Image (spheres, grey):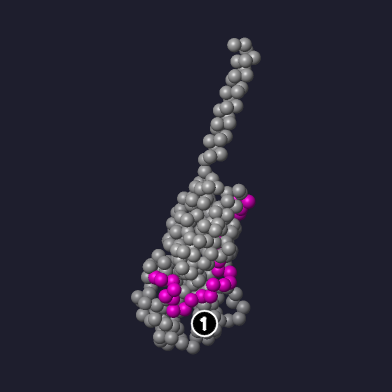
Amino acid sequence: MTKLLSRRSVALAALAVAAFGSAASAQTPQVLRIGVTPGPHAQILEAVKPIAAKKGLEIKILEFTDYVVPNQALHAGELEANSFQNQPYLDNQIKDRKFDLVSAGLTVNFPLGIYSSKYKSWAEVPDGATIAIQNDPTNGGRSLLLLRDKGILKLREGTGFKPSVADIVENPKKLKIVEIDAAQTARSLPDVAAAAINTNYAVEAKIEPTSAILREDPKGPYVNLIAVRTVDKDKPWVKALVEAYQSPEVKAFIAEKFKGSVLAGW
């Protein structure tokens, strides 16, 4: 073999190795660690997994039992995304904790409910009863807005989406409003007349969402979202993840699985 042929053979071999390496790399899925709360968010992501896999994404679901840690973990780079919150909650977290996060796409809506293990209707709830709501500004405020919209309380004008107990200006039933961690509201039912419970925690506690004695209308800014770090928002995997989530297959899964207690929000 001449030196020229020898050099050409080596070059061709190198090209073949490089090509094989590129092909192997192209077939390696992008691993996405996505934080969720237990219940519907985790269940829906399981349905997203096979669709995302066709787009070259491998989803690893990490469950968190509260509403604070998933954003902390995402901001710290311990997650690629999370899926558990609505825009007002994310805005409040960004303001209070300086997280550099952004919404990548809408997911589902969970109409908030007020539940009771003692009474079958709101009309049965006595004057002076104790009502538990969430102790974070977004979800607690949302519960107060629900009570306002149902004519049970009157709130100070101009409170926006995050009223507090201090903004109650009329309380005809003299309800005692207690604030507790959102994840504990379902467990509080034996100790209170009624409790405002986010749908994911109701489902986790095996409470039928349609059994709420008061239920939020499925409107407003409370559609949940996929959050990512701002630095990642324009990366191709973000678009692919949102497309996988907002697919017809996932919408059909939500409708069949949750029977109207969880609504597709896109």
Give residue 81's position: percent from left, percent from top.
53, 54
Of residues 9 and 82, the one nearer the viewer is: 9
Of residues 247 and 220, the one nearer the viewer is: 247
**Image quadrant where one finds the N terminus:** top right
Asked whether residue 153 is in view, the answer is no
Of residues 196 and 22, the one nearer the viewer is: 22
**Residue ID at (44%, 83%):** 122
- Name the side, left or right, on which 92 lies relative to 178: right
**Residue ID at (45%, 59%):** 43
Residue 224 is one of the magenta-drawn residues: yes
- Name the side, left or right, on which 51 lies relative to 131: right
Q: Does dot 1 land on a helix, a strand or a loop?
A: loop
* Magenta residues (range): 207-234
**Residue ID at (43%, 86%):** 123
**Residue ID at (58%, 72%):** 220
Residue 226 is one of the magenta-drawn residues: yes
**Residue corresponding to mark 1:** 150
